[in-house]
Image (spheres, rainbow, N blue to C red):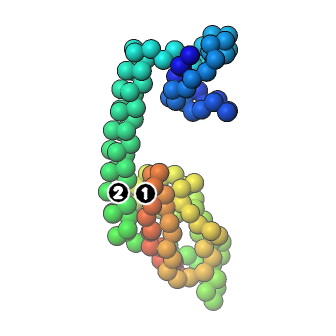
């Protein structure tokens, strides 16, 4: 029997996969537990429509991420900090970079800022930011003394 998975199931497949399972497994386990639905014409058409909608949204989100990437590449984020002979009092972390970018009008999750270790010296740095699935950009950060 062909079914469409509604949830990810180990060893069977992911959500939206059309798979062939034994009749008993489908009737006694998958369909009653709302893990799958029968793969008839109506459900297959609904699945195709849903997949096309997801692809369109994905393309739009990727385009907007590329536009934001172009803007961020040109941006220079400046931190003015207290220092003692080149060493900072404290450090610049992903949270402080996130807050600075939020002030500039960018909505970026702090978990998507790839900083190997906190910045604790003066100078210029490049920080990589993940904007979308396969869209990354490098932001220039300049740390200056007060």
38 relative position to 118: left or right: left
Question: 55 and 72: which one is in front?
Answer: 55
Quarter of the rendering containing residue 26 = top right
> Residue at the location (57% across, 59% down)?
95
Q: Position of residue 123 (x, y in %)?
A: 52, 83
Residues at discs 2 and 1 in contact (Cβ within 8 Å): yes
**Earlier sequence position, callout 2 versus callout 1:** 2
> Residue at the location (40% across, 15% down)?
41
Q: Quick one: quadrant of the N terminus? A: top right
In this figure, which residue is indicated by the disc labeled 2? 66
Q: Which mark is residue 135?
A: 1
132 relative position to 24: left or right: left
Q: Which mark is residue 58?
A: none
Per the model, the C-alpha gap separating discs 2 and 1 is: 7 Å
84 relative position to 106: left or right: right
Q: Position of residue 33 (x, y in %)?
A: 65, 14
């Amino acid at each position: 029997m062909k079914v469409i998975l509604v949830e990810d199931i180990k060893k069977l497949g992911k959500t939206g996969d059309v798979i062939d399972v034994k009749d008993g497994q489908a009737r006694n386990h998958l369909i009653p537990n709302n893990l799958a639905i029968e793969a008839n014409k109506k459900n297959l058409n609904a699945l195709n429509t849903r997949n096309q909608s997801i692809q369109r949204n994905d393309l739009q989100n990727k385009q907007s991420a590329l536009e934001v990437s172009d803007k961020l590449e040109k941006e220079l984020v400046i931190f003015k900090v207290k220092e003692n002979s080149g060493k900072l009092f404290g450090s610049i972390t992903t949270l402080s970079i996130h807050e600075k970018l939020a002030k500039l009008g960018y909505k970026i999750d702090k978990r998507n800022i790839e900083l190997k270790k906190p910045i604790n010296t003066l100078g210029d740095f490049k920080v990589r930011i993940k904007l979308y699935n396969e869209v990354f950009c490098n932001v220039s950060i300049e740390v200056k003394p007060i």
